[in-house]
Amino acid sequence: MKMKKINKNKKTLEESEAMEVMEQEDPQLDNLSKKKKKKKKKNQEKKEVHANEPMIEFEPKEKEAIKDTEQQESDHGEESQKKKKKKKKNKRKIDEEEEEMDSDSTSIKKTKLSREDGDEIFKKCFYDGKGDSKLSSSEIKDYFKKHSIHVYGQGSESIVPVLSFDDMSSLGKKCLKCCKSFKAPTPIQSMTWPVVASGRDVIGIAETGSGKTLAFSVPALAHISERKQRPVKGVNSMPIMLIVAPTRELAMQSQVVLESAGKEIGFKSLCVYGGVNKYAQRQSLKSGVEILVATPGRLLDLAEEGCVDLSGVSYVVLDEADRMLDQGFEQDIRRILGQTHKERQTCLFSATWPDSIRKLAHEFLKSPIKVTIGSEDLAAGKTVTQIVEVVDERSRDGKIKGLLNKYHKKKNRILIFVLYKREADRLWNSLKHEWNCTTIHGDKSQDARIQAVENFKSGKIPILIATDVAARGLDIPDVEYVLNYSFPLTIEDYVHRIGRTGRAGKSGIAHTFFHLGDKARAGELVNVLKESNQDVPPEMYKFDLSVKRKEHKLYGSFGPKDYDEELANKKATRIVFDD
């Protein structure tokens, strides 16, 4: 052990001698060596100070070296303090600007709302904050209060509602042509446009018929235009935008809006859904489309066949997300999102905000801003007058004819909801001799369903009898009355049914038959009526109004419980017995 130490010391001595010779030959190395020695000596002295108290007096040169070091540290500290003061000053400035929204809100938009940075490969920010300075803070508060608007998320405090289409002129005139028939943006549009057009992910919670389709479509057109003008190397160029919807009818409705808007700029769009032959859809995808609207099942089928590549999709919309999860599409949505570009911009729109939607948003949206118009819970629209009539089940045929005599004029549209397909056909056979009516349900071919909806929209056939397949997503203008011949199986379907009237700010009437066989939904119905400030018929109080805990969608009372997360996430295992 001692021998090793002697050899080590000898080696160190030889190295130091060799170093001295090199220093004499190279002045720069000499200076470097002196600095190292000073640093080494200083560290050695510090160790001695800690080891031996009291403090040892340093040599003048050492004092000078230490003083220089301390000065550098002091300068660094002062610089750090200056940065902190500057940061505080900037924050204070932003806070002041937030209080005075009418003075200069554009800088707030850049500082807080836009999340775009130099590392992102897609340009997502197109909003210049033109409309921000037009509203004072008191006017913004009044607008929020009037429409029951709540916003959450980083930078949400800087959002100023857009009250005029001209305020979105930074998107380009062509992108706004699809809005020319409207007077002003709806609340969901006025709140989400500045968010989405600033490059942020958004969660929009609003009742049906609130204008959500244009809320995500208008900023999307600017996004697609940018991608077309400046293609990103190595990224698939088509499709660019993907809208996923729960039903064929809702997908087709979005397609109509986007097709009309896209024509002005020269974008092609395609709607793919099940129930029809794939050949035409495959051919359209081969030719290339910028905008793809799809139901989850058919989209995955086409993707697995290699007909569509979603890797270049940079703008994704999940429309009626709560409905998709209710129908068991959660895993499909996850698979679809996993195939899109990792730097996509995502918009999630829903009528409600249950835990399942929160979890999905948390996983797939980046720093989103949530905009809620009205209530986050299931609620009927304030523009719909709800009339509930407690009846005998067998008296409904006579009563529905009485309501048609009362409500139906020559051309006004009336939507009648029933529970079952056979019930729809039976009621149609009962009414067709006196009224011009048609039906839509799952047993009808896709072409027949499309024709029925088109005839109803145009007013050619003003009375449509439908099952719940049409209860969600159909945007048919000027439906004055919704008649619930049969009460639906869930209160959610009731709210979505009556949401077919009273759309786009117009008023409507929903008249519902309720009988003894519907008593399990009595408590929930009364709650919806009370929340909407509607009259509750005295006969409803004869039923048991207690509300039972929700059962699992697939397994009823025997399924995983919401309160037992471990059990809910547990997968089935195969048990093999020995012979």
Image (cartoon, rainbow, N blue to C red):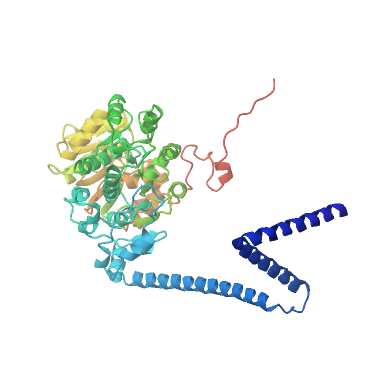
| Residue 123 appears left or right of 256 | right
Q: Nearer the viewer, residue 388 or 52?
A: 52
Looking at this rendering, what residue extends furthest in the top direction? 579
Q: Is residue 137 above or below residue 489?
A: below
In this view, which residue lies farthest toward the right?
2
Relative to 352, say whether 446 is above or below: above
Residue at x-position 65% and y-position 62%: 24
Residue 146, compared with residue 401, is above or below; it is below
User: Residue 25 at x, y = what percent?
Assistant: 63, 59
How many discs mark residues in the rendered view?
A: 0
Name the image quarter holding the C terminus. Answer: top right
Residue 160 position in % (x across, y down): 30, 63
325 left or right of 476 in image: right
Residue 141: image location, x then y, percent: 31, 67
Q: Is residue 131 above or below residue 516?
A: below
| Residue 263 image point, x, y percent | 20, 41
Q: State whether residue 375 appears in this view.
A: no
Q: Nearer the viewer, residue 495 or 225?
A: 225
| Quadrant in the rendering for residue 328 | top left
Instruction: Residue at 40% x, 41% y: name it.
Output: 341
Quarter holding residue 256:
top left
Residue found at the very far left of the displayed protein: 410
- Residue found 78% across the figure and 74% down from its top: 52
- 57 or 350, which is in the foreground? 57
Q: Is residue 87 left or right of residue 452?
A: right
**Residue 351 at least partly seen:** yes
